Image (cartoon, rainbow, N blue to C red):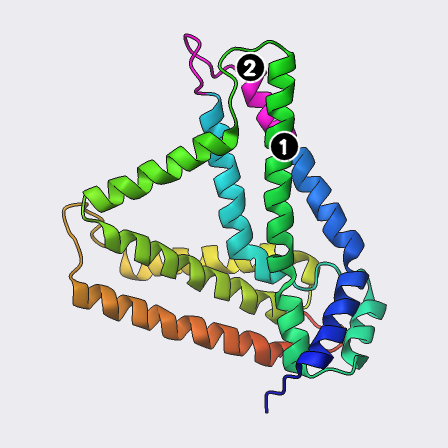
Amino acid sequence: MIQFNFNRFGKLAKWSLTNDRSYFVRSFLQVLVILTLIFLGFTTQFFTFKINGDTRAYEPCASIAMIILFVDLIIGPSLMFQSMKNKHDRQTLLMLPASNFEKYIMRYSTWIILLPLYVMAFFGADLIQYLVNVLGGNEQVQFVTTVLIDMVSDTSNHLWATQRRFMMTDFFVAMLWLHSVFALGGTFFRSHKYAALLTTVALIVYGLLHVWLFGMGNTSDEIKPSDSTDIIWCVSYGILIIVNFWLSYRLFCRNQVIGKFVNL
């Protein structure tokens, strides 16, 4: 039976935020340093991308930032135990006066807490590259944020103009399914440090087996799925998403300190 109490969950959240504070700060600084080096590498012409004085160097920065966002949205749940340094932390989690459901929600929320920190790191790196380029006297200096907004706007307008709105829905459902798979992988594999890597390997193996058994299918752009087909596809994957999260929670309830490769 699932039990949830807001007062108890608040105490659990306070403990988790205090215990994981160093992990959050370290993750923020890592992303800030990585994005800053990438932005400076492209916009200061360390990597030669500017042609005839245009601002093409900002496009790779925006693309990389978008990729990092998508990666975090997809693999984030598999990092729910990443902040726990040793067996003692896991033992403490098991003994906390909270239900398994409350503990699961708190552990799952780790990636949600990291997301705004990554956004802050992005804006910080963008501001640093802007100041460095202005002080360095580079021409046509701008923010990566502006280029990123333009890219997202152009892509959305193109999909709507070409009547491919279903692609946006399918893309969202596919991302949510992958998200649920990594949530399952985060509690399935005992090696929390490599849960994301092991889940990725499992997905690659699954994809190769699927292609080997069923082939690539017809990927022609001329074919557009009907509304009924698209609805059936979304509902089917919606059921799989619910099943993945349910299995992830059930495996979390079996998560013991005993060393095993998987939680079965």
Q: Amino acid at mark 1?
A: Ala
Total of numbered circles in the picture? 2
Find the magenta span and give its range.
36-56
Residue at x 64% of width, y 74% of height: 104
- In the foreground, 46 or 117: 117
Q: Furthest residue to the bottom?
A: 1
- In magenta segment, residue 183: no
> Which secondary structure, mark 2?
loop
**Which image quarter: residue 196?**
bottom right
- Label 1 crowd bin: few (<14), some (14–19), many (20+), radius 10 Å: many
Residue at x 62% of width, y 64% of height: 109
The answer to whether residue 195 is seen in the rendering is: no
Q: Nearer the viewer, mark 1 or mark 2?
A: 1
Q: Which residue is mark 1?
A: 125
**Which image quarter: residue 226?**
bottom left
Q: Which residue is mark 2?
A: 45
> Which secondary structure, mark 1?
helix
Q: Amino acid at mark 2?
A: Gln
- In the foreground, 120 or 248: 120
Residue at x 79% of width, y 79% of height: 96
Tell me: residue 174, above or below residue 219: below
The overriding secondary structure of the stretch rendered in magenta is loop
Tell me: residue 43, above or below residue 21: above
